Amino acid sequence: MVSVVEPHAYPEDLARFLVSSGEGKTLGLDHDELHRLVSVAFQASLLRDETRPVTFRLTIAPPSSFNPDEGPPTGHHRLRFDRPRPFEPQVLRRLAQAVDYRSGMIGVVPVEGDFKIWGLLHSGSLWLQPVRGGRRALALPNQLFVHVRGPGQLLITHGQRTLATLSSGRIEVPKTDVFDSKWLPAMFAPIREELMELHATARSQAQAPWARLDANLTKTISQHMVRRLLATIRESHHGGTVLILPVTTSEPLLHDDSTFRLRFRFDDPEPARRFRHLILEVMNTLARTAPPDSPSIGWSEYQASRNAKLVDLDEAIFEFAHLVAGLAAVDGAVLLNQRFELLGFGVVIAGGLPEVETVARAQDLEGEIRQRESTEAVGTRHRAVYRICAAQPDALGIVVSQDGGIRFVRRVGDEVVYWDQVKLGSHDV
């Protein structure tokens, strides 16, 4: 994320930004209407219901946009009031307690320069899957949404596309989703080749022909697992660190106290390799059950499949993500290798590693544009990851802060570089 205005921005600044960026025309609202919309939502976010914070989602669309015969998990359950309610902070405060943030929305429609609340929608939680990871997903309609996730914290989206956030008095726009970079999947390319070789061996031993798999399938499944892992850590509000080492160097480092100390090490190799077994079984099952003359089978076919075994395997993959997220709750990092084999947790970075006084913040996906900054402003968790990434050029560190921020860290040349993961989906916690 990149700041686009000076600190201490307010709803009027957010409305002006949306209009100046051209999004006002896309949304069909002018500056005054956008200002009214975000101002009321902002004021509601500052309220509390007894001891509970006020969080909610608004969908700015008429009730006719939603099929009255649909409902979760494939649609939205529409509940229209007998008469419209005023669009005011106190009304939003009361309604916020009637709809779960992760599965419900408040319906709002423009009326003569103002807005009215027409009812509620129950969407279920599948709308979070593109961010949290998952095989099934419910796409949000191409409409304006206002997500209120805490005091003074607004996220404006058009469907799944993030337009801007207002948080801590700053307006920000999405800049980088690290999963779209070239460098991240490149780090795991040898592992994907290993999996394809194992799959080819199983294929050669099959008694009947199998369908051919898209080479990107394992990449997509692995990325969804990591998304779920990070989202689960973020939802804990505890924060956590995941450290991923190359297969060739991870084993020697386990016995090298000069780099880190592993307080809880696993010595049961087969269970530690569970993710590798699961993803290989997904590949084999998908190829075995698809028509052999099908074109290359990939993520879309995996999503559409209702094969019972694939459903169970998909659930098992995300249970693995939840397991790793639980280990991250313990002080210290969770340690894996690039095969996502579990090595241990509670990693303490050795005190003898040199301090890293400056790092570079990546301004683009590939880290070609960077801004150097001091490490004095970050906490112990971040500084520890900077130190180990400086010492281990092929290591990847992922830090989830207590406030929900996600940072990917690696060494590029002689410099430690970090990427702040795009906060699309920060509204899911």
Image (cartoon, grey):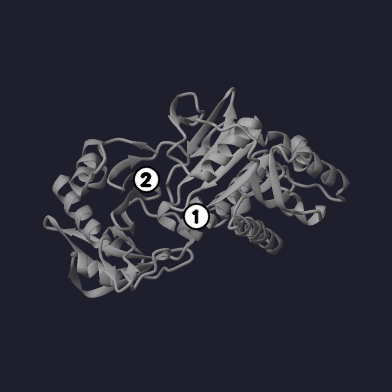
Which quarter of the picture shows residue 77? bottom left
- Residue depth check, mark 1 versus mark 2: number of the one nearer the observer: 1
Image height of 324 relative to 414, above or below = below
Which quarter of the picture shows residue 388? top right
- The furthest residue to the left: 112
Residue at image point 49% right, 36% down: 419
- Visible residue check, residue 296: no
Q: Position of residue 423 (x, y in %)?
A: 42, 46
Q: Position of residue 394 (x, y in %)?
A: 66, 32
Q: Nearer the viewer, residue 281 or 381?
A: 381
| Three-letter amino acid code at the position of disc 1 | Arg
Q: What residue would you read off at disc 2?
A: 162
Q: Position of residue 191 (x, y in %)?
A: 72, 38
Residue at image point 27% right, 58% down: 61
Categorize mark 1 by other alpha carbons within 10 Å: few (<14), some (14-19), many (20+).
many
Q: What residue would you read off at disc 1?
A: 234
Residue at image point 45% right, 36% down: 376
Q: Nearer the viewer, residue 262 or 118?
A: 262
Q: Position of residue 46 (x, y in %)?
A: 25, 61
Quadrant including the N terminus: top left
Q: Could you tell me which secondary element the residue under label 2 belongs to?
A: strand
